[in-house]
Amino acid sequence: MSRGLRVAVVGATGAVGTEMVRQLEISPLPVAEFRPLASARSAGSQVQFRGQAYKVRELVPEALDGLDLAFFSAGGEVSRTFVPEAVRRGVLVIDNSSAFRLEDGVPLVVPEVNFSAAREHRGLIANPNCSTIQMVVALKPIRDRFGLKRITVATYQAVSGAGYRALQSLYRELEAALRGEEIAPEVLPVASQPVKYPIALNVIPQIDVFVEEAYTREEMKMVLETQKIFADSHIEVGATCVRVPVGIGHSEVVYVETEEELPSLEEIRAILRGGEGIVVLDDPAGAVYPTPRHVSGRREVFVGRIRKDLFRPNGLHLFVVADNLVKGAAGNAVQIAERLYAEGLLPQA
Amino acid sequence: MSRGLRVAVVGATGAVGTEMVRQLEISPLPVAEFRPLASARSAGSQVQFRGQAYKVRELVPEALDGLDLAFFSAGGEVSRTFVPEAVRRGVLVIDNSSAFRLEDGVPLVVPEVNFSAAREHRGLIANPNCSTIQMVVALKPIRDRFGLKRITVATYQAVSGAGYRALQSLYRELEAALRGEEIAPEVLPVASQPVKYPIALNVIPQIDVFVEEAYTREEMKMVLETQKIFADSHIEVGATCVRVPVGIGHSEVVYVETEEELPSLEEIRAILRGGEGIVVLDDPAGAVYPTPRHVSGRREVFVGRIRKDLFRPNGLHLFVVADNLVKGAAGNAVQIAERLYAEGLLPQA
């Protein structure tokens, strides 16, 4: 008789992993055993969970024995090696890396959008890319009512999306800049690549590596993951992903064209207000709209600057903001587990 | 016998005015008399020009007597009052405010794009909005070759575009944030409006006041000024303007659809490289693209992240960056005067 779930967080000391622990901590999920795992480098450090200190164990295959659920957020390479080990052991994996997202038979799930896909899992559910999650949550009610033909999106992505080191580097660069000095940039755009650009008082139009046709991997994720989540390979997505000197909170300028003609602005606002997981902040007369400062710690997606296109009766402009570590990563992953549990699809306490 | 031009800079102590003086200083224009003018509040302060100190005089109608040329950058209200006074006195005005930009008979000029319009002036030439200028320079060679049907643009605009006070406020907010404190935001989004948002570690999706249909004035400028500069009321422009915590340098994610099908990416790059006033920085393999840090003090418009749309044979994505005080304001204004002088349309030394 289990008195709750045996849960591991893999990559528990990273930027997303830390938020994963916090999201699990505030979750109604009954956790009977909590097991933080990380690379050998971070093993031995301590993580607090529900008032108790836990020693981080090194991620080896055996560390995955006897679990019900494992959240992975330690990058694609770790997931490629250890997710199969976990699945083989009968652990349900919710993987925040991009390793398996586009694989057939692996559901790619945003609870508000396509939770039904999660019910078909075969031991592994993929958590989508941060910038994709918040966009599809915002667009779901529009798509349901009017159909979606195309999306053009420009992102304003926070530095925490590139991890702790990038965030520390932003603060160091800012301190230097305010002293009138300049220090060599160390992390961005891509930690593993030789070319570096400053992010303090700058924007960098590259997130992740370049892959094909001059697009970055982040941009291609927005194209392919959106198509998979909406289960529609005909949706045209044109994305440009840009890093901005913000700590937490991704923003997106989104333009969409719907299949059907759109109703009045007031009706569109009402439809968005009724969308699951959406907070509409939109009152031009009162200068009300979301900014990254509004979203910290929140699981909802914030939508504002709602406007009909001036030329196309099926064109709509939106500004979409969410906490990239919460709704864009850890919160979404824990939400998936919460809903599976609520539906009796995880061992019950 | 004149030995050069008698030139006034109105608003000589503001963010754009200071840059105007600098652009004039490094210009080949022969300046026989330099006259800095400003509001009563700033009158009496000193401005350096070509190695000499000049006392700023108060802007009254008589201060505009005996000039050949006056650059106005003291806001719309000052221009509405004093530009007609200058024109009446036979002074050629190049006005950086939005007061007369859309008026019939007032040429709205970006030298690389529509200099011919300047030759038709009747004493007043308007300088376009910063975010419009850099976009039309980048799109000119594309439009010339393939025609332009529509533009969707998201901006990443620097704080200096809102003036000195906004810039000082950004630095104060950043200093507080790095100390782990928060200070009340004072200037943005719009100095004259009661609602304020922080800009440090934030982005604000509002530039200038809201005007109609939930669009801001800045967004409507990008629509209407682009149509006027390209002399084509059929170009569809959808703009979303966003302030980012950058000091100098506006960036823009621009998506366009051309009338004709586009050639290969390499050919498009070559066409952009051949465009007047454009610097192409675009090599995905080497992580080469422009950022605001590249453009400070430059009159050119920088273009990178050039990509063909994945779904539309006439769709093109660009990332466009320029110094908003130089090419977006003062540099463009001085360029107009330089070209008029070179064509003999200003009194010759």
Image (cartoon, coloured by chain):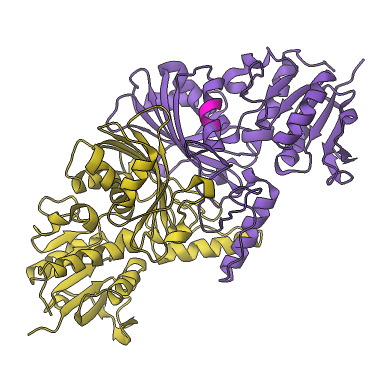
Chain colours: A yellow, B purple
Residue sitting at 60 percent across and 32 percent down?
A: B129
Front-lying residue, A278 or B71: A278
Left or right: B15 with respect to B179? right
| Percent x, y of residue B229 | 56, 21
| Percent x, y of residue B335 | 68, 26
Quarter of the rendering containing residue B137: top right
| Percent x, y of residue A151 | 31, 38
Q: In the rendered view of the protein, which quadrant contains the C terminus of chain B?
A: top right
| Percent x, y of residue B91 | 82, 21
Q: Which residues are magenta?
A: B221-225
Residue A218 visible in the snapshot? no
Q: In the rendered view of the protein, which quadrant contains the N terminus of chain B?
A: top right
Front-lying residue, A192 or B263: B263
Q: Vertically, is B94 above or below A223?
A: above
Front-lying residue, A239 or B232: B232
The rendered magenta stretch, by its main secondary structure, is classed as helix
Residue B217: within the magenta? no
Q: Vertically, is A82 above or below A246?
A: below
Left or right: A165 with respect to B181? left
